[in-house]
Image (cartoon, rainbow, N blue to C red):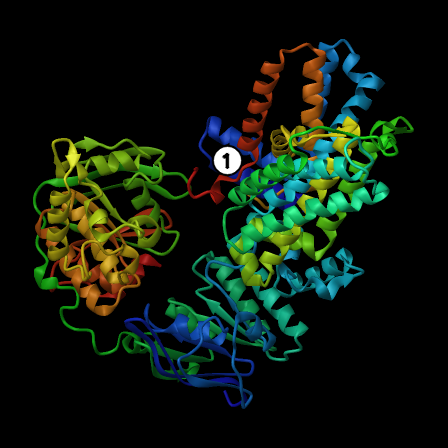
Amino acid sequence: MSSEAVITLRAINKSYPGVVALDGVDFSIHEKEIVGLVGENGAGKSTLMKILIGLVQPDRGNITLRGRPVTLKDPADAMHYGIGMVFQDGTLVPNLTIRENLFLCHEIAFQKLGFLLSRAMRDTARELLARVKVEVDAETPIAEVTPAVRQMVEIARLLWLSKLYKQENPILILDEPTTVLTEGERETLFSILQSIKREASIILISHRLQEIVENSDRIVILKDGRNVTEMSKANARIEDIEQQMVGHTFSADRYREDEQRDPGPTEVLLVEQLVRKRAFEPISFSVREGEIVSFVGLVGSGKEEVCRCLNGLEKADAGTVVLGGKRLSPGSPGDAVASGEGHIPIDRRSEGLALGMTVAENVNLLVLNRLKTGGLISPAQEKSNALRWIEECRIKTPSAGTLCANLSGGNQQKTVIAKWLSSRVKLLILDHPTRGVDVGAKDDIYKLIRRLAQDGIGMVIMCDTLEEDIGLCNRMLVMKDGRLVGEVPCPPRKKPSPQDIIGLIV
Amino acid sequence: MSQTRENVETEQSTGGHGGLSASLKAAGRWFRRAGVSGQLLTLLIVAAIFAVGTKGRFLSLVNLQVILSLAAIPAIIAVGLHQVVVLGGIDLSVEGVVALCVVFVGLLLRNKVNTNDVGFWIVPIVIGIGGIAGFVSGLFNTRLKIPSFIATLGMSWILWGLAVYISRGQTVALLDTRFEVIVTGNVFGIPILAIIALAIVVVLQFVQNGTRFGRYLYAIGGDETLARQAGVKVERIKMIVFTLAGLFYGLSAFFLSTRLGGSQAITGNNLLFPAVTAVAVGGVALTGGIGGAKNAALGALIVTALNDGLILMHVNPYAQDAVNGAVLVAAVALTIDRRKLGFIK
């Protein structure tokens, strides 16, 4: 927009070990505008925002606030300049009330003789909540309100803080604000944002391009840590944005489609009338030998819960899961593993790997029984088994005795896969297997997934992007609002386009 | 406000699975949510059962005075301890702190072993010693970064050892009787000790509700990471809480030795269990963030009343211990927030 730039970031560089997150990015925010920031996972959006709120320091580049250079040394510092962020997972303390959270750590404004003036706080809280159209009582604990209300409370808090620091044009950053909202709440959010826009600037990050196009005045696209382009609302089209986000590096065989095989005849997994109240309605499906079945759907579609019921982390209310002819007892991860089901969790650091153990120990964890000599675990067999899988899965580690904590994300993920491979699983559930993994390691993981399929292992997979889902799977199951709404075959070279699928998802 | 709370509550309770775990959850939620009404109800039930069981003796004026006077010291200790629990930690140092403080009371007031006589100064001195002990526990926890249960358990044994070393294991009889009135006297029929305890609870409860310290205490207990992100000076609050706990233990030590008319290190023994039980029964969740001074004090009153009633009913003392253990387990089962625990260790 034509008005003055409030804050300008110029030629920002930031590298992490092994990854260049930002490579000479420019970004500026003007008064009273909504900027849509889009890009694939790993494009550098979150790093850029972290720099803007002082959580991360850039390696190079400069930041100017209304023409004056500034350093934002931490989030509190950034807040003094009126810059604040509403995080995806929230920053409100659950056991405190809305009012207590609104003023947390800034109660000094309401303090008299060491005691807090609760009436003044209550009045201010009411005013602030009215502004963001929250009708819940300010004395309700945060743990008891909906995600939508929490988000509004965070916005109200940021607005109040900016006012406290006498910032006339605060900058609010919203990271994927709509993922946790219902349709109606989404509309409310955007109408509130439009009204806040009269006195603030907003940076909107979202994967839902529709809402970006509808609500932003300007759209900035990042890819692989670089500015791709910028477009104004008038000439923004979703197809163009998608094209720009993905770029031209979309190779013909990014997901090793050529190695995709037709599944075998036997059904490894048979799910019948599986149901979990308030998560998903009765669902039946099967997975054949060597078949990759992808579950797609939005957050809250129920796909995560279905997978959690398959591996016993959640207990289904009714229905059966039959794995290799054996009925699994519901809600028992131990039974699932014993029956030959593997699970590659989204958060490998806390669920998939023992980070404090060595690569060898992790790889051998499930097969210790097979590595015994005379009743005791044999170090020689342990070593040979570990070395074999390190070799086969191409885990780049200095030695089998290296702690997993010291490996890169991609190699940690390969270690998790090696663990299941060596245990001869029949079915593997892969929950976002390439999340937080760099491009080279991604390809290694795709290769491993193809090999698993060739070995006859059935897979249920949920990916980071729709393209990845389409590229990897043999068959796609689409879920929406807890129901299975579609089944799309994805044979090699005859894959559907993301546009075909998106209609089913939303 | 009750509107929204009830809505959420009914929504949640219909969502659970049936059976024991759901009813346990529902009961626990009510127990936590209701402030002290659950505790008052428990107290009423305990009183009703014993009133019947003892044919009214439990409710006699004398017995009620006994209960109040016996509950006062555990209440002061529990009030000191509960804030550490609200933070999400635990303080196991009370026995050692009291042992050391008691020994100092014996050696500094007029006694049969030496010629010291600090008179009234004993109160600030002994509170100060307790406070220093708490401060050091706090340093162990926040500077050495070791879990509070180890920091305070170690502290307890360090101080116990010091206490025995300084007193050479002897009992020191007190000759100073000026303070006896505090532990034996009544005002309008209410034991002075109980009035002191009540005053402490009222003041601390106000501080917890109405000051930034209180707010930050609960913020840390709710989620330490988020509190830190919001700008709470977590370490400073922890230091204050451990130090306050020590101050309260020191004060209790003064009352204990005055009541005994002498001092010996083992006076500190068997104070920890009732205090932890009181905190749990009072509704302070061991997972932190929930429960205030009034909860800790009410918990101490319930535990004291329970034991008094059992004695009046001539229940075998060993069976009493077993009852107390069961009460602790039951109270924690009701108040703990299992979502906060990744693993039960």
Above or below: residue A315 compared with residue A461: above
Within 10 Å of disc 1 (Cα), the crowding (few <14, some 14-19, many 20+) is few
Nearer to me, A232 or B292: B292
In this rendering, does residue A264 appear at all?
Answer: yes
Please tell me which residue is depicted at 72% across the width and 23% down the height of the picture.
Answer: B44
Residue A151 locus on image (x, y percent)? 54, 60
Residue B181 locus on image (x, y percent)? 87, 30
Q: How many marks?
A: 1
Helix or strand or loop: what does disc 1 sit on?
helix
In this rendering, does residue A293 appear at all?
Answer: no
Above or below: residue B145 compared with residue A44: above
Nearer to me, B149 or A36: B149
Residue B41 is left or right of residue A400, and the answer is right
Above or below: residue B157 compared with residue A257: above
Q: Residue furthest right?
A: B188
Nearer to me, A103 or A172: A103
Residue A326 locus on image (x, y percent)? 18, 31
Please tell me which residue is depicted at 57% across the width and 65% down the height of the picture.
Answer: A155
Above or below: residue A411 compared with residue A453: below
Q: Chain of mark 1?
A: B
Nearer to me, A71 or B74: B74
The amino acid on which the numbered mark 1 sits, given as a three-letter code, is Thr
Residue B231 locus on image (x, y percent)? 59, 63
Residue A504 is left or right of residue A489, and the answer is right
> Would you name the residue on which mark 1 appears?
B14
In the rendered image, the quadrant that contains the C terminus of chain A is bottom left
Please tell me which residue is depicted at 11% across the width and 64% down the height of the picture.
Answer: A493
